[in-house]
């Protein structure tokens, strides 16, 4: 099975140049410096004399220039200038390095323009307190309001480390899951800023774990006097991003997990065959093409991702796990009128391995879910999910200034959107369907909601959803619905 994944990886690598990318594909309206437009059409072009960047006290200039889809010396069709400036602004905002970005052009005589880029940098050092719920989502935890099932502690994050978009993070977490870790990402390791590396290491332990599902709700085993599970995870990542929109991600990781002997008395397939320990290497590869106007809350554009995931590489003698997963994701966003926006998305998980340890199998109800089923887990080794939504812009993005001494916080933006939506999905479960009636059946949900969007990528979604069982629920989420 790993050979099949490698074949898929090779296909996507070889097909990279076939994907559209605003940096690699030359439009008839964009001519580089070493190309001379015909004299009869030269008046239709403007040459970029220089690019002036201001406001970057931390961020290196080359990091900003990396996201601009043209260079000093390039010639751009006059009809394309505004489109190129808009693309540069969106690319810079999508780095999550800046709260505000403006990109303007200034006539410089002789059919030349000077590009003015002004950025307002974010606050990059965060000693962040941790308070997070252990459940799959906030709504599942709020139904119980059990603070014993919450995590607390702190992160020490340094984003944009050394001004090169690097990210360094240390964290110590206590409560339901005790965890310690370190992570460091270097996105621009090469001179051409196309490749980067990252690594992370984490150790954690729990007094309680979910070991199964019944009636589409998780079952838990707890031992207050001893750790039920101890886990070590180490990761090494490689990123490759040649242009602006297309990216490749490779990750290899080692996982070592140990559970209390009592676990095998209540389940036989947490690790498979009543094992109490599992050690394995895993390989992940993903290819993304991203043309969204915003990664956090997109309104226009599209996104596609292919992911190959192989658990168990046959490196260790006792590495008995062999699970292969393929994921396909497609999302599209369209502006219908001045205030109306349409969005839709589809995701599929395919796996040839129908018998998987409970520890590694996840269907719907985790990061992928049908709205209206936030309280349920639908196990499955394979699944499909589609989503659609119509938004109305109640309050267009506004910028406000408040009297605070720190200029990185005293100016913020906000917007409100009303939306209606509908989701549908199917989880194909060959292991636990007998005890979980929502598996192997067509599911759907629909509803209405209000979205609040503001700076530092903060999103608050308030939704009222109805599911197939005619259950009505009010749900809170902190990311974009599609």
Image (cartoon, rainbow, N blue to C red):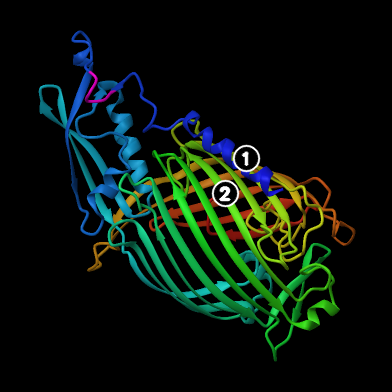
Whether residue 251 is situated above or below residue 286 in the rendered picture: below
Residue 111, percent from left and from top: 14, 22
Q: Is residue 8 magenta?
A: no
User: Disc 2 to disc 1, how far (Cα)?
Assistant: 10 Å
Under circle 2, the secondary element is strand
Quarter-of-image position of residue 8: top right
Query: Residue 155, located in which quarter of the rendered image?
Result: bottom left
Asked if one can make out residue 343 in the rendered structure from this viewpoint, the answer is: no
Q: Is residue 103 left or right of residue 355?
A: left
Q: Position of residue 331 (x, y in %)?
A: 57, 39
Lateral position of residue 378 relative to residue 282, left or right: right
Bounds of the magenta span?
Answer: 31-35
Residue corresponding to mark 2: 285
Residue 132 in the image: state x and y as whole percent: 55, 72
Mark 2 and mark 1 lie on one chain; the one further toward the N terminus is 1
The reply to whether callout 2 and callout 1 are in contact (CB within 8 Å) is yes
Q: Residue at x 47, y 43 (%)?
A: 247
């Amino acid at each position: 099975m790993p050979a099949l994944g490698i074949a898929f990886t090779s296909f996507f690598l070889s097909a990279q140049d076939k994907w559209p990318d605003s940096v690699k594909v030359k439009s008839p309206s964009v001519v580089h410096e070493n190309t001379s437009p015909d004299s009869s059409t030269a008046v239709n072009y403007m040459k970029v004399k220089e690019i002036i960047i201001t406001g970057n006290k931390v961020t290196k200039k080359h990091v900003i220039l990396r996201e601009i889809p043209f260079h000093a010396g390039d010639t751009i069709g006059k009809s394309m200038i505004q489109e190129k400036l808009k693309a540069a602004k969106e690319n810079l905002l999508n780095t999550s390095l800046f709260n505000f970005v403006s990109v303007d052009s200034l006539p410089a005589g002789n059919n030349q323009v000077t590009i003015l880029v002004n950025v307002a940098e974010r606050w990059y050092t965060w000693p962040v307190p941790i308070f997070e719920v252990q459940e799959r989502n906030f709504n599942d935890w709020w139904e119980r309001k059990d603070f014993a099932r919450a995590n607390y502690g702190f992160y020490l994050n340094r984003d944009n480390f050394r001004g090169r978009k690097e990210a360094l993070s240390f964290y110590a977490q206590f409560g339901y899951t005790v965890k310690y870790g370190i992570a460091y990402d270097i996105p621009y390791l090469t001179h051409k800023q196309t490749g980067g590396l990252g690594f992370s290491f984490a150790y954690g332990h729990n007094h309680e774990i979910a070991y199964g599902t019944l009636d589409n709700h998780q079952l838990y085993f707890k031992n207050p006097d001893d750790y039920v599970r101890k886990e070590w995870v180490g990761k090494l990542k490689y990123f490759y991003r040649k242009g602006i929109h297309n990216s490749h991600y490779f990750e290899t990781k080692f996982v070592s997990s140990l559970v209390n002997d009592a676990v095998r008395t209540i389940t036989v397939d947490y690790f498979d065959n009543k094992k109490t320990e599992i050690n394995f290497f895993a390989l992940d590869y993903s290819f993304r093409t991203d043309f969204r106007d915003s990664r956090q809350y997109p309104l226009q554009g599209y996104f596609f991702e292919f992911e190959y995931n192989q658990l168990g590489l046959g490196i260790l003698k006792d590495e008995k796990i062999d699970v292969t997963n393929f994921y396909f994701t497609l999302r599209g966003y369209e502006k219908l009128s001045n205030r109306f926006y349409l969005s839709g998305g589809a995701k599929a998980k395919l796996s040839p391995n129908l018998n998987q340890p409970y520890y590694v199998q996840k269907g719907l109800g985790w990061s992928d879910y049908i709205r209206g089923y936030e309280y349920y887990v639908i196990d499955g080794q394979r699944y499909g999910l589609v989503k659609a939504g119509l938004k109305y812009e109640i309050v267009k993005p506004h910028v406000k200034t408040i009297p605070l001494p720190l200029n990185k916080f005293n100016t913020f933006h906000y917007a409100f959107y009303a939306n209606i939506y509908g989701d549908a999905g199917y989880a194909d479960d060959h292991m636990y369907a007998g005890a979980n009636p929502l598996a192997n059946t067509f599911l759907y949900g629909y509803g209405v909601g209000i979205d609040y969007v503001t700076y530092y990528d903060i999103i608050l979604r308030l939704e009222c959803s109805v599911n197939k069982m005619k259950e009505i629920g009010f749900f809170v989420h902190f990311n974009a619905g599609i």
